[in-house]
Amino acid sequence: MKPRDVVVFAVVTMGLLLLPAFYGRANYLLHILVLSGLYAIPAIGLNLMLGYTGLVSLGHAALAGIGAYAVALLTVKAGLNFWLALPLAAIASAAVGAVIGALCLRLRSHFFMIVTLAFGLILHSVMNNWDSVTGGAAGFAGIPRPDPIGFAAFRSLPEFYRLTVVATAAVFAVQALLVRSQFGRVLDAIRQDEILTAFKGIDTTAYKLAAFAIGSGIAGLGGALEVSYLRVAAPSSFDMVESINLVLIVVVGGAGTLLGPILGALVFVGVPEYLRLASEYRLVIFGALLVAVTLFARRGIAGLFAPRRAKTA
Amino acid sequence: MTTLDIREVRKSFGGLQALAGCTFALDRPGIYGLIGPNGAGKTTLFDVITGRQRPDHGHVLIAGSERVLRPHVLAGLGMARTFQECRVFPELTCLENMLFATQPKGLGRTLGQAFGRSAAHRRAHEAEARHWLQLATLERYADEPASILSFGQRRLLEIAAALVTRPRLLLLDEPAAGVNPALLAVLRDVLVAQQRAQPAVVLIIEHNMEFIMDISERIIVMHQGAVLEQGSPAAIQASPRVIEAYLG
């Protein structure tokens, strides 16, 4: 990790934290940024799988849903403190992700994608129909905002905005540390040539499983924060369309780049809002962007800023 | 402990018997050529040794160990291999390709290092990696991605990267295929230098007779799924049975 990168990261994070002080009344802007952050977090989890390991999962939103319903049940039904429920929710998502991963990772390429899609549909179907536990299609209402820690409260929009910034920055930092370590280099090697990686002495199944579990755990964290912000967990937030949205965010933002998921989420949330379009047009815009990215910018928006990835760490 | 011990290995695909009781053992370090007409079972034997195929009958012992082994375990036992289709990491530089297998491999260790202090593993092997790159005439490309290399150069990189791990057993699947004569001479030099620096059992499948006769100290001839003849290159070239198998 270069010192310059760390400084830039710290300055940007501080700047974002100070934003409400200048735009304290610009609630709309803060709301957009919160939503972007809440998409960026699971997208970072997916980026570890899709961008770095080459595992295209089409059920990622459902794994965010596991974290969402876990935090809902733990805080509302079990009366747990939010800050205890949050890591447990991430662990629940990671555990479910590990089980699904253990079943899917025997398969390759498109077979893998289809089975992750199927698991996403199954999980969504459970959330949508298990009325006594999840509240069914009407959703699970009454999820609290995070409990205060000392002087820091998280009830108002600027307060929750700051929490989102810190959470997104923390997940981003975890991603950077993982990707730039030997662990990340192994994931990258698996994406390039899995058979060769195995014959170089690496238990590729274990690494893919770890990437799947970590990616799922991060998704669960994002899902838990999302429902705490919205105060309700609805199955439609974690359906197949949302899973595909996450793939679009990662690919358009720049799969296999550190900033890709965040840029993708900002564009995904921000552009339709800026253009005052109904969210139905979002897929049209993103479909066109996807074609453009595939043709002209294989490393997404992030790739436009860094023409070639730094090769040596 | 015998490095590679193949005992009565049989393997059939439907009605086709690819290996019909193949037996040989390689113990002393050296370069061994594995030849035979098309369909003799060479590639199936390679697949059985590397764990891609399970033998119907018989045993394959690598460094005395016999289980159906997964690739990373084989690598841990000191086996390295190259592929007929030639595999390198295209996005890594040549130097990174060389160093990849010298880095820590365990999941717990690499994950732990991600959040702790990282040790300087790279430096320890860099001099050796550069030495092999130089022998392979690739030192100019040390910091270039492997994808820019020609096929023959990639082949040399693949072999050099296998040598850095100091394997006890090295399997090369048609290393000379698609490599031009100039690079073939380099390849020969690399393998000879390897035998001098770190003796290992090197088993080479090859169709290029000139190359394999020149470089091997022993030749194993396969025919119809079994070993037909073993001996020095000169003895093999004079063997009537071998000549008949190839021409018959």
Image: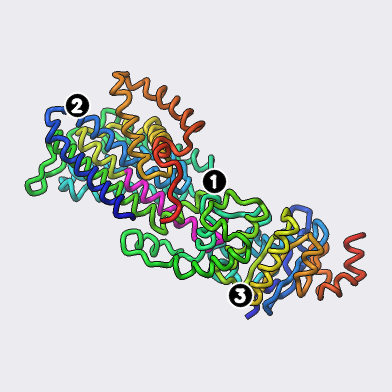
Tell me if mark 1 has few (under 14), some (14-19) or many (20+) residues whose alpha carbon lies within 10 angstroms of its own.
few
The residue identified by callout 2 is: A28
View extreme (front): residue:
B140
Q: Residue at point 26% right, 36% down?
A: A132
- Spatial distance from mark 3 to mark 1, Cα to Cα? 31 Å
Q: Are marks 1 and 2 on the same chain?
A: yes
View extreme (left): residue:
A151
Is A204 inside the magenta-drawn segment?
Answer: yes
Q: Chain of mark 2?
A: A
Near-viewer residue (A79 or B93): B93
Q: Position of residue B206 (x, y in %)?
A: 75, 61
The magenta region covers A194-219
**Which amino acid does the dot numbered 3 rest on?**
Ala
Q: Is residue A235 left or right of residue A283?
A: left
Nearer to us of marks 1 and 2 is: 2
The residue identified by callout 3 is: B63
- Spatial distance from mark 1 to mark 2, Cα to Cα? 43 Å
Whether residue A124 is visible here, answered yes or no, is yes
**Which amino acid does the dot numbered 1 rest on?**
Arg
**Whether residue B196 is situated above or below residue B180 in the rendered picture:** below
Whether residue A243 is visible here, answered yes or no, is no
The residue identified by callout 1 is: A108
Q: Residue at point 39% right, 38% down?
A: A305
